[in-house]
Amino acid sequence: MESNTWYTVSKQSLALYARHAGFDLSVYNEYSPAVQQELRRRAVNEAMRAIELAFDEHKFSLRTIKNGVYVITIANPLAIQYPSGQSQVLYIGRGDIYKRIKSHFERKLFEFMLSVGGAEFDFHFAKPARSGTPKYFEYIEQKMLEWFSDQHGENENQKCWPLLNRIAGAQKNYKDDSTDWWKYPLRGTNKKPLWAMKPTKHNDFAL
């Protein structure tokens, strides 16, 4: 895996994961609690298998990225309406990629995917590296979160994190990069989303 290069797994779908696991996501609420639990377990396993297989095409294992960064986005034609503008970014994170993504699926990400039905999602991964900069991956996560807040917050005094983020990254006061390679998944594609969603105050994901 090349350092400071983004790798993307596109068009991932919870409905498809569930179908491959032998369940129909559209009737999730009609299943008994025990069946719902089993659906979640099998769907998460299918999700991780699909993402790992996609990485196999790049000739490396997702499990080897221990100090990585990642961005989870909702795919076209959807976006999220933030206080200042729209973005497809749902979460910015870092760490042991395989363990972190699996943990997201087992918690908030599964719930969010379930709430938006047949929507598809893109996963972007990178392995930051810079000579003489320990824990560079933590610095990159911080830079991405700050840049996102500057772009989508109402003002500089009120921070705005991606929908599934709740806290800022670790503060690392390193020398700024000479390039902005890390902005790639935050900028979105040239294809403009057709729909922008915003959770209501009754939603667990309310901004």
Image (cartoon, grey):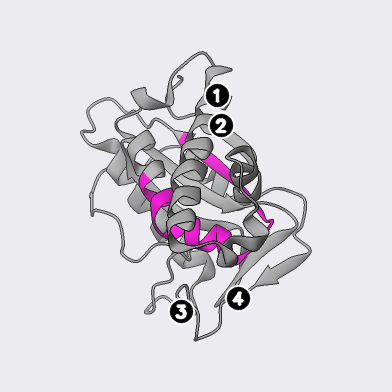
- Of circles 2 and 3, the one toward us is 2
Between the C-alphas of marks 2 and 3, the distance is 39 Å
Is residue 153 in view from this perspective?
yes
Q: Which residue is mark 3?
A: 155
Q: Which residue is mark 1?
A: 53
Q: Earlier in the sequence, mark 2 or mark 3?
A: 2
* Figure quadrant of residue 58: top right
**What's the amino acid at mark 4?**
Lys
Between the C-alphas of marks 4 and 3, the distance is 19 Å
Q: Earlier in the sequence, mark 4 or mark 3?
A: 3
| Residue depicted at x 22% and y 28% | 132
Q: Which numbered tag is attached to residue 200? A: none
**What's the amino acid at mark 2?**
Ala
Quadrant where the N terminus is found in the figure:
top left
> Could you say where residue 67 lies in the image, as x and y percent from the top left?
30, 33
**What's the amino acid at mark 1?**
Leu
The magenta segment: 103-125
From the viewer's side, name the closer residue of 73 and 82: 73
